[in-house]
Amino acid sequence: MNKKIIWLIVVTLIIGATWFYSGQQEAVNVRLVAVNEGPVDFTTSNTRAGTIKACQRSRLSLPMGGQIAELFVREGEHVKKGQILIRLWNNDQKARLADAKAKVAMARSAVIESCRMAALNQRERERLSSLAAKKLVSAEHLDSATTKALVSMASCHKATASQKSMQALMDLQTAILEKTELTAPFSGVIAEINGEVGEYITPSPSGVATPPAVDLIADDCLYVSAPVDEVDAAKIKKGMLVNVTLDAFRGEAFNGQVIRIAPYVKELEKQARTVDVDVKLLDKAQQHKLLIGYSADIDVIIEQKKATLRLPTETIIDGDHVLVYEPNSGTLVSKKITIGLSNWRFSEIKEGLSEGDQVLLSLDVEGAIDGALVTVEE
């Protein structure tokens, strides 16, 4: 074979191999996502992290000072409504109450005695009045019986009033005794206790904040309070559905509903003006794993379409372009689109794409541009 022909064949093979391998090296590995049908929400979110709070939380203190005699609970313990939490030394008050009860009993006996005597004297007056009408007894005798009946009736009224006074005194002593006991106003969990048996506690003076004796949190009802920018807050209405997410449970969403929009705007230094929005968590079965104080974010659903063409928002370039994969050529092609409702997860595709079109998902891949040759990763 002619050497020139052999040389020409070799050069041709080298050029072809070079072109082939260089073409393979220029292909970019990318990930794609298909245009599909699904729900898209138009939402507004909080500007700063919100907080999981309890629907009821009371920092309890006793209305009077004294020495702690008994401490019935510990931190972290669940208590029921009406359960006694702390009792002060109250032997003196118990004695006063016992004395008041005894006086009530005495007053009750006095009422029985005086009122029965008044009834007897009244019957005697009526009997003599009947005899006097028949001229069988003197007028003086009847007058004496009438006076005696009236005096007896007055004694009955006096004894009755005295009994009421003694009863009121007993009620007062009972109320004072109750002030030596701190009870739970609702069921919940003990978050904090300030005090030990034998220590003295005093109520807060006016205008001076002191630590509460017991911090009680209701654990059967939780909500999220989050600040929303004043501009976005105008779109929010009570009853709107909300998606709640927490850093502690990444990838999991909690369903909520707007229950309160603050009627005022907060103005914090060096921060945007915000409005606090409270969101009730709808699924009580999920609440048991949440802790008071967790940070939380809210996405209030302003408008929703349940079935529309959509794409992940991260695939859209400058709000109106995407890179579509052409399977015939194996390249990416820039395509203009029109979007509708949009949030940080999905955007509605109104024009420019059809269901099933493959769009570039990994925009951060170097070389993944319009016209680039690509290979698709599974």
Image (cartoon, rainbow, N blue to C red):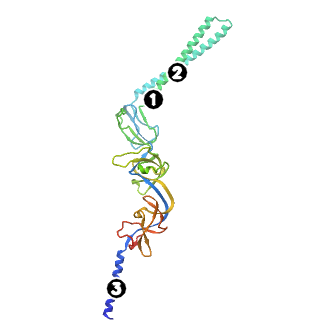
Q: Amino acid at mark 1?
A: Ala
Q: What's the residue type where badge 2 is placed? A: Arg
315 left or right of 159 in image: left
For label 2, the crowd category at 10 Å Cα-Cα, with few meaning under 14, some 14 to 19 and many 20 or more, is: some
CA distance separating discs 1 and 2: 21 Å
Q: Secondary structure at mark 2?
A: helix
Residue 195 appears at what percent x and percent y? 35, 37
Residue at 32 percent of width and 91 percent of height: 6
Q: Position of residue 125 (x, y in %)?
A: 62, 11
The residue to which callout 3 is attached is 13
Q: What quarter of the picture does the C terminus occupy?
A: bottom left
**Disc assigned to residue 208:** none
Q: Residue furthest right?
A: 134
Q: Quadrant location of residue 211?
A: top left
How many marks the image carries: the answer is 3
Disc 1 or disc 2, which is closer to the eye?
1
Question: How far apart are the alpha carbons under marks 1 and 3?
Answer: 106 Å
**Residue placed under numbered mark 2 in the picture:** 108
Name which residue type carries label 3: Leu
Residue 251 in which image quadrant: bottom left
What residue appears at the point 34 percent right and 78 percent down from the top-left corner? 22
The earlier-in-sequence mark between 2 and 3 is 3
**Marking on residue 175:** 1
Q: Which of these two is toward me, 167 or 353?
A: 353
- Name the secondary structure under disc 1: helix
